[in-house]
Amino acid sequence: MAEAVEHEFPLFPLALVALPSEQVRLHIFEPRYRVMINECLEREREFGIVWLADDGLKPVGCACEIERVLERLEDGRLNILARATRPFRLIAREDSLAYPAGTIEFVQDGAEAPDEDASAEARGSYAALVEEATDDEPDADALSAMSAYEMAATVEFGLEAKQRLLELRSENARLRLLTRLLRAALKRLEYVDRAQARARSNGKVRFG
C-alpha cells in the first residue's frame, strides 16, 4: 500500500540508515545541504535520509523531521537533531533544485493479523539484550507498546540489517527479523563478557 506521490522531496544521501523513531544527529556543512536544511526549517518540512551504499542509492529511505538546531556556526554550518518518522520509496531523482531531491511515495504496511508469538519472542529477546547490556530491566508497559522499529532504533545494528528492516512492509516480518538480530547481538555481547572475564582473571575462568 502506498500514499500519494510527493515531488521535489529533499534527499540526504548518507552512509547511514535511519529507522522510524530513531534520533539522528547531523553536521550540515556542504552549501547545498545548508540550503536544504534551512528551507526545511522555514517550511517545517521533512527531508529524507537514503543510504548511499557502495552499490549506489538504496530504493527505500526514511523521512526525518528536524527536532531542533543544536548549533549554528558563524560560517553557516549547522548541527541538528532530527527524528526519523516514516519510510518512503524513491521513484526518481530530480535535479531541478539547489540540493538533491526526488519523487517519492510514503509506504505503508499491508493488512495482517498480529503475530502474538513473534511479538513475544521479539520483546523477550529485546529485554534480555537490554538487561545484559545495562543491568536494567525494561519497563514492561513501555516495552509492550514498542514497535519493531522502536526497539531496533535503540540498538546498534549494521547498515545492511537496518535497511532490511526498513524495507519490510510487514510488522510481523520485522519482529521475526528483529528477534534473529537481537539473539545474535546477545550472543556477541555474552562472548565479549566472557572474554573480558577471562582477561580479568589472567586466562582462568572464575566461577561464582
Image: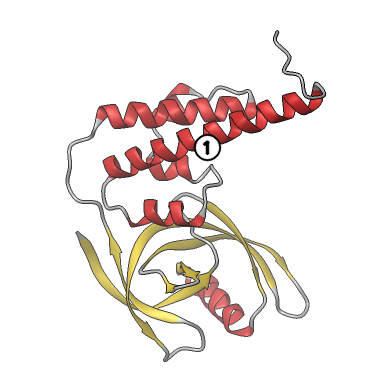
Tell me: 89 left or right of 97.
left
At label 1, the amino acid type is Ala
- Seen as rendered, the residue at the extreme top is 208
Observer-nearest of 64 and 185: 185
Q: Position of residue 43 (x, y in %)?
A: 48, 73
Residue at point 40%, 69% (across, down):
58
Residue at point 24%, 32% (across, down):
115
Residue at point 60%, 23% (across, down):
136
Figure coloring: secondary structure
Observer-nearest of 178 and 204: 204
Q: Quadrant of residue 205?
A: top right
Q: Position of residue 95 (x, y in %)?
A: 42, 89
Q: Which residue is mark 1?
A: 185
In which quadrant will I find the C terminus? Answer: top right
In which quadrant will I find the N terminus? Answer: bottom left
Q: Position of residue 28 (x, y in %)?
A: 64, 72
Residue at point 49%, 26% (across, down):
127
Observer-nearest of 69 and 25: 25
Q: Position of residue 142 (x, y in %)?
A: 46, 29
Tell me: 112 left or right of 34.
left
Query: Please, what secondary structure does the residue beneath circle 1 have?
Result: helix
Mark 1 neighbour class, 10 Å CA radius: few under 14, some 14 to 19, many 20 or more = some
